[in-house]
Amino acid sequence: MTSLAYTFADSATMLRRNLKHQLRYPSLTLMLAGFPIVFLLLFVYVFGGQLGSGLGGHGAGGRDAYLTYVVPGILIITVASAALGTAISVASDMTGGIIDRFRTMAISRGAVLTGHVIGSLLQTLAVLVLVAGVSLAIGFRSNASPLEWLAAAGMLALFAFALIWLSAALGLAAKSVETASNTPMFLTLLPFLSSGFVATATMPAGLRQFAQYEPFTPVTQTVRGLLTGGPIGAQAIAAIAWSAGIALASYLWAVRLYNRRRAAEPN
Amino acid sequence: MTITLTAPAISTRAVRKSFGEHIVLDGVDLTVAEGTIFALLGPNGAGKTTMVRILSTLIPADGGDIWVGGHDVVTDPDAVRALIGVTGQFSAVDNLLTGEENLRLMADLRHLGRQAGDRRVAELLERFDLTGAARKPLSTYSGGMRRRLDLAMTLVGNPSVIFLDEPTTGLDPRSRRTMWQIIRELATDGVTIFLTTQYLNEADQLADYVAVLDHGLIVAEGTPAELKRRIPGGHIQLQFADPDALRAAVSMIPNATPDEDQLILQVPGDGSVASLRRVLDELDDARITVEHLSIHMPDLDDVFFAVTGHATTEAAARQEEEALQL
């Protein structure tokens, strides 16, 4: 086999390992899905009636209109909260003994991280399907064509890929599993400071500028445009640029942290 | 006639390593011949684990030359990794998988292929007496089973050099003997074994060659027999009923050290039955009665005292503690 074939084989082995972990201990996956579902129900049934009346240009207003408005935001927060799992699983791997064994074997560089990232991506997609299913079950209706659904899924997957690499890097930077489960928490806050739950135009100046320019807003607007109609335009380009930028920077950071850890003091 | 020169399996020259201000290894030279069992003996904190981590490519040394299996650890770590197997002091198993899945993971990472991998996994489960527990999660494994699985994982790729960092620390006597047996079998198959231990007894039982590490330096090395000859610690202790008997015994046995107050005579010896019988026969012939007899075998503390002039850190700490209690 060539070295490229080895890279694929080793990454696939590590991916299988991570998927086995997920299947054997599904509680983490369920917890990652539970969080956005609770938010979905909370925002639609508790706040939705009032928030929906404040929406301009989204049909009749009220709870149904807010459901249509908030589902893209919920899908984005799903991506953000699912990414938290990566930091936890990477950190628990790094603090365990098995990683030292991997490092004394001739395994392709990066296979361990690739296994985690692809594993988390598949986990996130499964959670997204679950959350989308609940959204449809409580009445969310989309006028999107199959191609638009596919494009929305692609956008979510790309953004998830970026946040998962960021979370992997945060997991590597953490000294303990506890720290790793806390540091990426800001990712679940950012969707609230975007157009995910209310229109940015209703926010006070300062916060409004932040919300308009932070990465979660263009991604939300792109997914919203694809699923429920409405303008996308430059938002898609910004969304893709942000995702690619976060993915690349986080990837480089993660690989650097991973390679540097081998110089660490024992114990 | 042809002369085949075999390169040593492991050789190091002037290996140095510090963590911050703390010097852990201060110029270590080692040579391990192919197919032999080498024991690095030393107390906790001597630098044994650091040496293993450097030799197994886990951490870089600050300086020195290190060759494993003919490859430079610094410039060609992957070639070294392809040859070695490492079982560390702390279990390096995947706790979320079963025993069989752990072995399968190693087989996949060694690129054995499906059929060869299945064969190797089944073979190792059998050999390490883990077949019954193969499909059970590791949470149900005992300490001895985990250690066996750990070593089995190390062996999946048929490594030619194996590092074992304190392979029997924390094991009960029966598991320890099982582990010794496994290590001997590996050596019989021609595998080079580099093990670290705190127990002279273990080095004595297993190793062809022993090096004693203290404060980052090799302070003594040789075969177990050579090392033990340097230790004055082995002796028979004879207790007599009265001073006359003690004096009579002193006049008969050369090199013996009497303790007049306690009526004790220390006779240097290797603890063998033959030497014991000789001493007792001589005393018996002279009609000298021995009240009580005890045999003192040299241990790591004796080796340390003999080669470094100071006790092991643990022994020193123990003595200090005892002194405080008095």
Image (spheres, coloured by chain):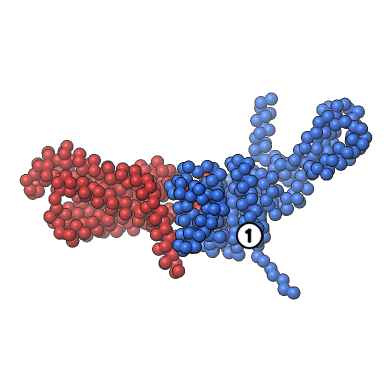
Which residue is depicted at the point 24% across and 43% down?
Answer: A37
Q: Residue furthest bottom?
A: B1
Q: Residue B153: image x %, image y %?
A: 52, 54
Residue A102 against residue B1 in the figure, above or below: above
- List the residue tagged with mark 1: B189
Q: Amino acid at mark 1?
A: Asp
Mark 1 chain: B
Which chain appears red? A
Q: Residue B242 is drawn in which quadrant?
A: top right
Q: Residue A258: image x %, image y %?
A: 44, 54
Residue A30 seen anywhere in this rendered image of the structure: yes
Residue B65 against residue A217 in the figure, above or below: below
Q: Colour of chain B?
A: blue
Residue A250 seen anywhere in this rendered image of the structure: no
Q: Is residue A161 left or right of residue B187?
A: left
Q: Residue B219: image x %, image y %?
A: 70, 49
